[in-house]
Image (cartoon, grey):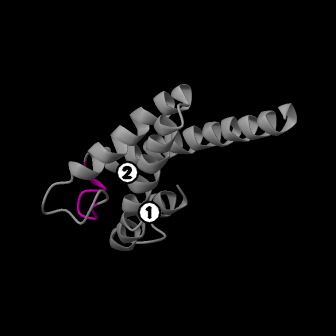
Amino acid sequence: IITLSDLECDYINARSCCSKLNKWVVPEVIGHAVVTVLMLISLHWFIFLLNLPVATWNIYRYIMVPSGNMGVFDPTEIHNRGQLKSHMKEAMIKLGFHLLCFFMYLYRLVSKVVLK
């Protein structure tokens, strides 16, 4: 979110912004897919069903990158067609999702320790 807002305010150029953001796309896809599979294996159905759409969206977004682009975030296209605003909105939604998951996992951890 900070990197995208820096680009929006012209504190950094599009190429450096996109290279910073693209560096974290693959670890995000892998990490979220692993967490989703682990929730399926451990039979936590609610958390699995909560994570499944986000993991699917991350994989879809990574697979559907056009062949000439630098990555999910492309410096030549980020200012076109409102992509910067959509990337910013997506980052805010993911932040809210991860905060929700953090507090759910924390609640589950505390409830398991207290009930033992």
Disc 1, SS? helix
Q: Position of residue 28 (x, y in %)?
A: 44, 55
Q: Quadrant of the C terminus?
A: top right
Per the rendering, the mark at residue 84 is 2
Is 40 in the magenta? no
**Cα–Cα span, label 2 and label 1:** 9 Å
Disc 1 residue type (three-letter):
Leu
46 over 23 or under it: above or below:
above
52 over 71 or under it: above or below:
above
**Stretch of the chain drawn in magenta:** 74-80
Q: Position of residue 21 (x, y in %)?
A: 41, 63
Disc 2 residue type (three-letter):
Leu
Per the rendering, the mark at residue 7 is 1
The answer to whether the residues at label 2 and label 1 have Cβ atoms under 8 Å apart is yes
Q: Which of 76 and 47 is in front in this view?
A: 47
Is 76 in the magenta? yes
Give left or right: position of 1 versus 78. right
Q: Which quadrant would residue 70 be assigned to in this image?
A: bottom left
Task: Give the mark nearest the N terminus, 2 or 1.
Answer: 1
Residue most toward the front?
116
Which residue is at a point 21% across and 53% down the rendered structure image? 65
Q: Where is residue 1 in the image (x, y as percent from the top left)?
A: 52, 55
Which residue is at a point 39% across and 53% down the rendered structure image? 29
Disc 2, SS? helix
